[in-house]
Image (cartoon, rainbow, N blue to C red):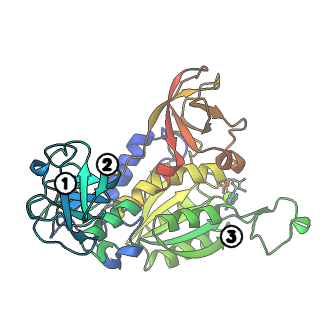
Amino acid sequence: MMSLAATRTPLKPLEDALNALLAFAVPLGTSEMVSTFDADGRVLAADVVAALDVPAHDNSSMDGYAVCSSDWLNASTLLQVNQRIAAGSSGTALTPRSAARIFTGAPIPDGADAVVMQEDCTAAQDDSICIAAAPRVGQWIRRRGEDVRSGRTVLYKGELLAPESIGLAASIGFDELCVASPVRVALFSTGDELVMPGDVPPADMKPGAIYNSNRFFLRALLQRLGCTVTDLGIVPDKLEATKAALAHASGLHDLVLTSGGVSVGEEDHIKPAVQALGQLNLWQIAIKPGKPFAYGKVGQAHFIGLPGNPVSSFVTFLLLVRPFIRKLQGATHLAPECVAASAHFNWPRADNRREFLRVRRNAAGGLDLFDNQSSGVLTSAVWADGLVDNPPGQTIVHGDVVQFMPFSSLMS
Ligand code: AMP
Ligand code: MG
């Protein structure tokens, strides 16, 4: 068992904590087949290799006429329309000085090397057409294999599947995909002050009681990452109860995730409980919000303790738990999107911890700051659409370039 000194240990920089956390997150390596319909948001567990060309044949990208460009001599040249090729059917080879009526997606007949849009053709006598300008070889033809070549890997193991990727998999005939099995997560909240919405109406809340909000967003965040969540509810602020909940949760789960009780107060029992049952490897990170954070192992299960303050809990989930879970799923790309943006606010008081400020993009291409950055103010997270990653000791002046992380990439 590893013991960490309580108060004097310097807080761990976020990047060190993240690296350590990801080193512990050995991919689970379990996979399952799911319908391609259901694969959005899952991590691919095997490469997807094309067994055919897409498109499978040269085909028309317009409604019009397939022609042989050398048959055209001038705007009076008559071409006999002697066949009709719709999408899903196939034609016969063009005879000299003929044209095939053709529709979008239909295969180009042998002998044709261009398609002329119907708008550029005029009907002449006896089912013939004239074409105003010389057809250019290849015009309005989509080439066989121009999207995907047979034998090519189109999606890679470790990739996070998106709607467009499942469409691409379907385009090469995959009705099922091999994806990482869901990570099994046990979730519980600590805090004797916590009340579940629905159990007590707002008017009857006792002094000091608060509704359990963390349970709701943590479960939702886990579900967005495709986890199977066992919600163990609220655990009282007692060492024995905390140990019992941890011991129970660690069986049959890959990860035990808790919120609250991870500081050094007398009512904070997470740290001693984890140390009694397993090991604590990480504790406290130099970020704001989110200093109280713990990682350890209880039995075979990973343990992560998040802070109780809702915004701290939310932000540490986004920064640390999301990549941890994605790594367990075998995802290869773990870093969230981080882009330079212009601060349309001042932040005059530097903090010695790295800060994650709740901000929102404005129509002028800059970032506005929510006026209350307290770690208990969940309204800030709802108002915001991302975080500014502000280095330790850094003040910000209106117009400064800062690093912006959109929530969209921190939650997927
Ligand atoms: P703790 O980390 O347990 O000391 O809690 C820090 C602050 O977060 C306290 O004000 C708690 O009341 C609050 N808190 C803890 N857990 C939750 C929760 N599940 N939902 C909302 N607030 C919480
Ligand atoms: Mg507490």
Identified at 38% across, 47% down, the residue is 335
The secondary element bearing badge 3 is classed as loop
Q: Give the camera-side residue of 112 and 247.
A: 112
Task: Determine whether label 3 and label 1 are within 8 Å by CB.
Answer: no
Percent coordinates x, y for residue 337 in the rendering: 43, 43
Identified at 50% across, 44% down, the residue is 285
Task: Determine whether label 2 and label 3 are within 8 Å by CB.
Answer: no
Ligand 1 located in image quadrant: bottom right
Alpha-carbon distance for marks 3 and 1? 89 Å
Vertical placement of residue 55 versus 294, above or below: below
Query: Between disc 2 and disc 3, whose residue precedes?
Result: 2
Residue at numbered disc 1: 78
Query: Between disc 1 and disc 2, whose residue precedes?
Result: 1
* Quadrant position of residue 278: bottom left
Alpha-carbon distance for marks 1 and 2? 14 Å
Vertical placement of residue 161 versus 231, above or below: above
Residue at numbered disc 2: 120
Which dot, 1 or 2, sits closer to the camera? 1
Residue type for callout 3: Pro
The secondary element bearing badge 2 is classed as helix
